[in-house]
Amino acid sequence: MSARPGSAPWLLRHELRLFWYTTLSSPKPNAPRGFHWKLVAIFLVLWLLLHLGAYVVLKRVAPGAGPVPQELVVAASAILVATFLFMLSSALKSSVQVLFDRGDMDLLLSSPLPSRSIFTVRLAGIVLGVSAIYLFFLTPLAHAGALLGQWRWLAAYPVLLGTAALAASAAMLLTLGLVRWLGARRTRVVAQVLGAVAGALLFVLSQLPNMLGMDRADQDRSFGRILASGGGIDAESPLWLPGRAALGDPLAVALVAVLALLAFGVTVVLTHRSFTRGLQLAASSGRTARRPAGALRFRFGSSLFGVVVRKEWRLILRDPQLISQVLLNLLYLLPICFLVFKDDGARPVAVGAGLTMLSGSLCSALAWIVLQAEDAPDLLQSAPASASTVRNAKLFAAIAPVLALVGFPVLWLAWNRPVAGGLAAFTICGISLGAALIVMWAGKPGSRDKFNSRGQRNGMAIILELSHLLGWGGLAFLLPLAAGMAQVRAGMMVGIAAAATVALAMPGLAYLLRHRAR
């Protein structure tokens, strides 16, 4: 039976069709509309293989009887909390997209549809979109368990959907609260930053033992004690409810489902009017600012090089959303900084390689923004200015911030370990310059709002950048090792020569293929 037009199920069916169309359509811009059936076939084959693997694994595992060991409960709870953080990160991005990036809200709000139905469907769409990837990889366990009579694995459905509902409700409440507190323009930036930080926080927490100076044996012993004792928390504590639900405890599964439905319903009832108000604010957030008072002042007196550099940096600073996407990589710099600033446990090899690869990634991102996302390329080409000066200024504008960001850790490393610091400075400078040149010669122009998808439809540039990154990363790893050897072995020399060849050849290859890349 078809859903009544204008009802919530009717809108939800539209959202699901749009989601599947967006996910499974062809990535080529000029491809005909419709599903990309080769991609659908690949997903189906992969899903069948996951079912086969889950069946083989569960068939070898005894169903088990009696209470579930506390170690498994603690581990499952930790995994589910990590999953919730990842879902929260995705849900924040989806909430921002619903408020700011969808182009159909004006039509929906001007229709006779109730705002509560619109909000319910959009929130349900976020839940399904957030949980889709987890359902794809984990529901084969549920299906294989049902075939083998291990019914507790069917808890994957309510637990994953419940976790996604909690994450989506929290994300939407946070986004609407930020709209009311900060306004629509700032909320778009802050919500995306929070979503990115929520996902990267797990990486930083995973490196906490290394930051505290614990070796591998201490980490294993501490991890074993936490699993065995649950961190001193009673085994019947409600804090372990997620873990018991993930392992198929019927009461825990029911509680998680009820809690998720309650959070979803409360979010819909209490905030659907705030949702409408947030959409109205978002629609008005693109208005231009008032012209500053006073006469225009033109200041000439700086060189062309300085003018171009300041122009590029000013444009980047005017786009906080772009800054948040680029500087997210700085979160991954924190564990490296802890290793650098520890006098007794620092590993100069790992530190140098980490700083080098981080610099290459940051420089590649900034170079694409400065060189390929130029808003007025025709104006620059027709201007009575030296093209080489403009190009060199853009390269400097992309490389200088990266060197400034990693400069302090490198100087600290050089002060304590001069050889390691000098080699790290060499590889960082080399990878920064090479990454910028590859983007300049092999990158494809695009707008700044396409920053996250800049690598699509340009596979050659991706291969060149990745090979260049691995080449300089290998040099940063092998050179300190060779410097600490009394006699360098032949295998080490071959590895250094191979890494140097890859690192230096990629920019040259990008130059030779520069016309084909366009």
Image (cartoon, rainbow, N blue to C red):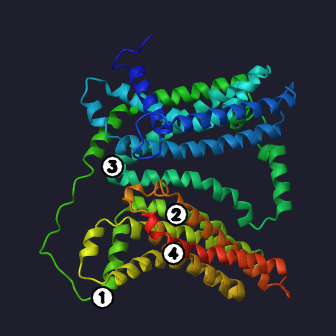
Distance between the alpha carbons at the discs numbered 4 and 3: 31 Å
User: Quadrant location of the C terminus?
Assistant: bottom left
Is the residue under label 1 in contact with that under label 3 (CB below 8 Å)? no
Residue sitting at x 57%, y 76%: 406
**First reached walking from the N terminus: tag 4 or tag 2:** 4
Residue sitting at x 76%, y 20%: 147
Question: Residue 329 location in percent, x, y?
Answer: 55, 63
Q: Which amino acid, mark 4?
A: Val
Question: Residue 151 location in percent, x, y?
Answer: 75, 21
Residue 358, by quadrant, is bottom right
Look at mark 2 in the image and give the residue it sits on.
461
Distance between the alpha carbons at the discs numbered 2 and 1: 33 Å
**First reached walking from the N terminus: tag 4 or tag 1:** 1
Is the residue under label 2 in contact with that under label 3 (CB below 8 Å)? no
- What crowding class fits label 1: few (fewer than 14 Cα within 10 Å), some (14-19), or many (20 or more)? few
Distance between the alpha carbons at the discs numbered 4 and 2: 20 Å
Is the residue under label 1 in contact with that under label 2 (CB below 8 Å)? no
Look at mark 3 in the image and give the residue it sits on.
184
Q: Which amino acid, mark 2?
A: Ala
Look at mark 1 in the image and give the residue it sits on.
303
Which callout, 4 or 1, points to the residue nearer the camera?
1
**First reached walking from the N terminus: tag 3 or tag 2:** 3
Look at mark 4 in the image and give the residue it sits on.
402
> Eyeballing the image, is 485 above or below 322?
below
Residue sitting at x 36%, y 45%: 101
- What crowding class fits label 3: few (fewer than 14 Cα within 10 Å), some (14-19), or many (20 or more)? many
Q: Which amino acid, mark 1?
A: Ser
Please give left or right for residue 159 compared with residue 432 in the image. Answer: right
